[in-house]
Amino acid sequence: MKPIVAIFSIVLAVVGSTLHAADAPKQPSPEMRKLEMFIGKWKYEETEVATPFGPGGKSTYRATDRFVHDDYFVEERATGHSPSGPVSWTWFGWYDQESGVFRSTNFESGGRVVAGTFSIDGDSMIGFGERKLGDRTYKTKSVYRWSPDRKSATYETSYSEDGVTWKLWYTGKATRTGR
């Protein structure tokens, strides 16, 4: 009986490791190269409108974006000041090879987690997400436009209660300050 158990254990170990290896892509998708425009050190300057998310006013942030985990993800770490006070976040963006879309998750100071999807076409990016506030869920839409030299970008983010009527949340400019 013991030899059968040993053989069965070996077969399970070999099959299990083979299946696990087959699940993982051998390299990041070529689509990840589109995220190279994010890489570097950035300064963000924004003008926010008073919304259900907070008061209006000026915001400034500093961020560093880099490829992580064998280039499967882009990570952005940022800190700064908004009209509501000091803020920080860690953002991850990646290309989901199974569904064929870019995805993102943002972990913000205060414990908020925001997930979304986005697409990139040349020097433009458009992203969609949802943001919960109390018992309400708002849809968000962000549009970024990079300069041809990729040293700066302008952007605006809007929100909607119904996905039809959109209201401006903030506009901004990102300037690359280093690699």
Image: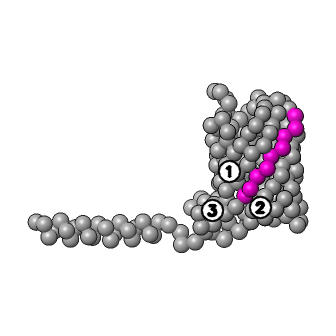
- Residue 14 x, y percent position in the rendering: 32, 71
Relative horizontal placement of residue 170, taking residue 90 as reference (left or right): right
Depth check, front residue: 9 or 101: 9
Q: Is residue 60 magenta?
A: yes
- Measured Cα–Cα span from mark 1 to mark 3: 12 Å
Does the residue at mark 3 contact the one at mark 2 (Cβ under 8 Å)?
no
Q: Residue at x 29, y 66 (%)?
A: 12
Tag shown at residue 91: 1
Q: Which circle's residue, 2 or 1, is located before the other in the chain?
A: 2
Dot 3 corresponds to which residue?
68
Dot 2 corresponds to which residue?
40
Relative horizontal placement of residue 13, taking residue 89 as reference (left or right): left
Q: Quadrant of the N terminus?
A: bottom left
Residue 50 appears in the picture as rendered: yes
Estimate how packed mark 3 is, as few (under 14), some (14 to 19) or many (20 or more) residues with alpha carbons within 10 Å. few
Q: Which circle's residue, 1 or 3, is located before the other in the chain?
A: 3
Q: Secondary structure at mark 2?
A: strand
Question: Which residue type does callout 1 highlight?
Answer: Trp
Q: Is residue 10 above or below residue 100?
A: below
Does the residue at mark 2 contact the one at mark 1 (Cβ under 8 Å)?
no
Question: Which residue type does callout 3 highlight?
Answer: Val
Depth check, front residue: 163 or 48: 48
Q: Which circle's residue, 3 or 2, is located before the other in the chain?
A: 2
**Magenta region:** 57-65
Q: Quadrant of the C terminus?
A: bottom right
